[in-house]
Image (cartoon, rainbow, N blue to C red):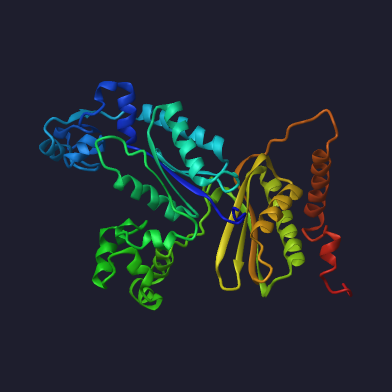
C-alpha cells in the first residue's frame, strides 16, 4: 500500500533535443553523425550532437573545428531556435496535463510532482514517455524518485548506462528508501553542483564517490567546505526536501511562524494554519493576485524540514480554500509523536486576480463579499480589528 506522505517526483530530459527536432524536419539525418552548432571558421561551438557523432568523441560545447577533426563526416546544421521553442512548448503542455506542479528548468528539461496520482511512478513514467513520443515525435529519458536530486541523477545515470547509436529513451526509478544505496557507487561528479574544482577538492581528502561523501564525518565536511559541506553530506544520503517550484519564489506569497516551544498539539497547529492562511489570503487580495498552487512548510524539532504542495483546480485568493487545502496537506504528513518547531503556508504560481461572475449567489461569492468587507474593516481600523472567535480563546481572558 502506498504511503500517502511519500512524494513522487519525475525528472524528464529530452534526448539530444536540438538534433531530435532537426531529425523530425529531415528524416534522412537518422543514424548519421550530425550536430547543431556554429561554423568552424567563426569560432563556432557545438550546441547538440547526434548519438552517432558522440560515438566519435563529439560533445556539446566543443569547438566546431575540433569536432570536425574528430569526425570529418560530421554534418553541421545551423540552430533554429524558433523551432526548438515551439517543440519545447508542446512537451511542456503535455507535462501540465499530467500535473499542475511542473518546474521547467531549461528548454528540454523539467520536473513534475505527481504525488497525488494513484498509479505507481514507474507506470506514470512509461505512459508519459510514450505520450511525448506519440504527440511530438521526440524521444525523452525519465528519472523518478522521492525528491528532485535523486530523480535528476537517475535520469543522468539511465542515459549514461544506455549503449548504442540511438536515443537512449531510458527510464530509471529509484524505490523509496533506496536513495542512499543507489547513489553510493556513483562518482562524486554525478552529484548536482559538483564541478571539476569541487571534484578535485573532494578527491584531495579521499572522497571519490557519493558513498564516500555520505560516510564522511559531518564535522570534516563542514570544516573543509563550510555550509556547503553540510548540504553535500545531506544530498549524498539522498536527502532533498526542495519542492517542485512552479514559478520563481518571487512570485509567491507565504507566511510562517516558529513556535516559542515545540508543539504536538494538532488543534493548535490547525488554528495557527488558519491564521496564516487568512494572512496569505489578505495579502493576495491586496496585491490583486490569485494562487494556482498552495503549499505548506513544516519543521520538526530536530530541524528536519519538509514542504508539500498541490495544484488547485481553479486559482484562489480565499482564506477558506487556502486553509482547507493546507489543512489537507498537513493531515498527510502529520506524525502525532513528533514535535513541530515551525509551520508555514503559502500560495505560488500567482496570476492576476480574476473572478468569474455567476447568475446564482454561490457560497464562494458570499465568502468573497464577506472577505471584502472584512478587508475594508482592517484597512480602516487596523489588521487586528477583526479576529476569529477561536483565536480569542488563546488570549488572556482579561483582554
- Considering only vertical position in the picture, is 119 above or below 256? above
Residue at 27 percent of width and 65 percent of height: 208
Outermost residue toward the right in this view:
398
Q: Is residue 112 visible?
A: no
- Considering only vertical position in the picture, is 197 above or below 351? below
- Give the quarter of the image for residue 237: bottom left
Q: Is residue 20 visible?
A: yes
Considering the image in quadrants, where does the C terminus appear?
A: bottom right
- Considering only vertical position in the picture, is 49 above or below 328? above
- Considering only vertical position in the picture, is 322 above or below 235? above
Q: Position of residue 105 (x, y in %)?
A: 43, 44
Residue at 25 percent of width and 68 percent of height: 203
Outermost residue toward the front in this view:
1
Q: Position of residue 325 (x, y in %)?
A: 70, 50
Decide if residue 23 is on the left or right side of residue 324: left
Decide if residue 70 is on the left or right side of residue 296: left
Decide if residue 346 is on the left or right side of residue 42: right
Q: Position of residue 386 (x, y in %)?
A: 83, 57
In this rendered view, identify the residue nearer to me: 270 or 252: 270
What is the count of numbered marks? 0
Q: Position of residue 147 (x, y in %)?
A: 48, 55
Amino acid at each position: 500500500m502506498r504511503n500517502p506522505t511519500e512524494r513522487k517526483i519525475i525528472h524528464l530530459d529530452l534526448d539530444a533535443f536540438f538534433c531530435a527536432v532537426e531529425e523530425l524536419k529531415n528524416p534522412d539525418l537518422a543514424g548519421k553523425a550530425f550536430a547543431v552548432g556554429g561554423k568552424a571558421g567563426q569560432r563556432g561551438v557545438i550546441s547538440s550532437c547526434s548519438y552517432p557523432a558522440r560515438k566519435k568523441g563529439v560533445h556539446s560545447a566543443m569547438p566546431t573545428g575540433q569536432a570536425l577533426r574528430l569526425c570529418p563526416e560530421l554534418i553541421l546544421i545551423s540552430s533554429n531556435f524558433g523551432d526548438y521553442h515551439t517543440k519545447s512548448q508542446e512537451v511542456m503542455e503535455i507535462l501540465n496535463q499530467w500535473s499542475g506542479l511542473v518546474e521547467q528548468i531549461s528548454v528540454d528539461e523539467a520536473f513534475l510532482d505527481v504525488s497525488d496520482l494513484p498509479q505507481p511512478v514507474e507506470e506514470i513514467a512509461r505512459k508519459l514517455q510514450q505520450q511525448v513520443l506519440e504527440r511530438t515525435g521526440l524521444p525523452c529519458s525519465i528519472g523518478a524518485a522521492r525528491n528532485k536530486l535523486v530523480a535528476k541523477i537517475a535520469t543522468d545515470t539511465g542515459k549514461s548506462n544506455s549503449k548504442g547509436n540511438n536515443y537512449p529513451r531510458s527510464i530509471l526509478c529509484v524505490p523509496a528508501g533506496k536513495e542512499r544505496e543507489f547513489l553510493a557507487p556513483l562518482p562524486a561528479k554525478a552529484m548536482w553542483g559538483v564541478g571539476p574544482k569541487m571534484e578535485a577538492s573532494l578527491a584531495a581528502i579521499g572522497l571519490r564517490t557519493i558513498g564516500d561523501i555520505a560516510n564522511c564525518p559531518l564535522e570534516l565536511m563542514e570544516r573543509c567546505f563550510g555550509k556547503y559541506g553540510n548540504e553535500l553530506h545531506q544530498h549524498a544520503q539522498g536527502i532533498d526536501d526542495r519542492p517542485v517550484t512552479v514559478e520563481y519564489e518571487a512570485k509567491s506569497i507565504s507566511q510562517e511562524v516558529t513556535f516559542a516551544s515545540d508543539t504536538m498539539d494538532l488543534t493548535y497547529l490547525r488554528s495557527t494554519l488558519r491564521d496564516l492562511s487568512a494572512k496569505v489570503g489578505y495579502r493576495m487580495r491586496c496585491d490583486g493576485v490569485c494562487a494556482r498552487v498552495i503549499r505548506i512548510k513544516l519543521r520538526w524539532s530536530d530541524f528536519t524540514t519538509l514542504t508539500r504542495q498541490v495544484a488547485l483546480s481553479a486559482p484562489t485568493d480565499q482564506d477558506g480554500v487556502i486553509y482547507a487545502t493546507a489543512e489537507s496537506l498537513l493531515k498527510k504528513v502529520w506524525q502525532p509523536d513528533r514535535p513541530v518547531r515551525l509551520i508555514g503556508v503559502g500560495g505560488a504560481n500567482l496570476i492576476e486576480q480574476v473572478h468569474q461572475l455567476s447568475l446564482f449567489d454561490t457560497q464562494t461569492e458570499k465568502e468573497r463579499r464577506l472577505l471584502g468587507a472584512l478587508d475594508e474593516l482592517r484597512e480602516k481600523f487596523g489588521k487586528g480589528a477583526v479576529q476569529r472567535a477561536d483565536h480569542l480563546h488563546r488570549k488572556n481572558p482579561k483582554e
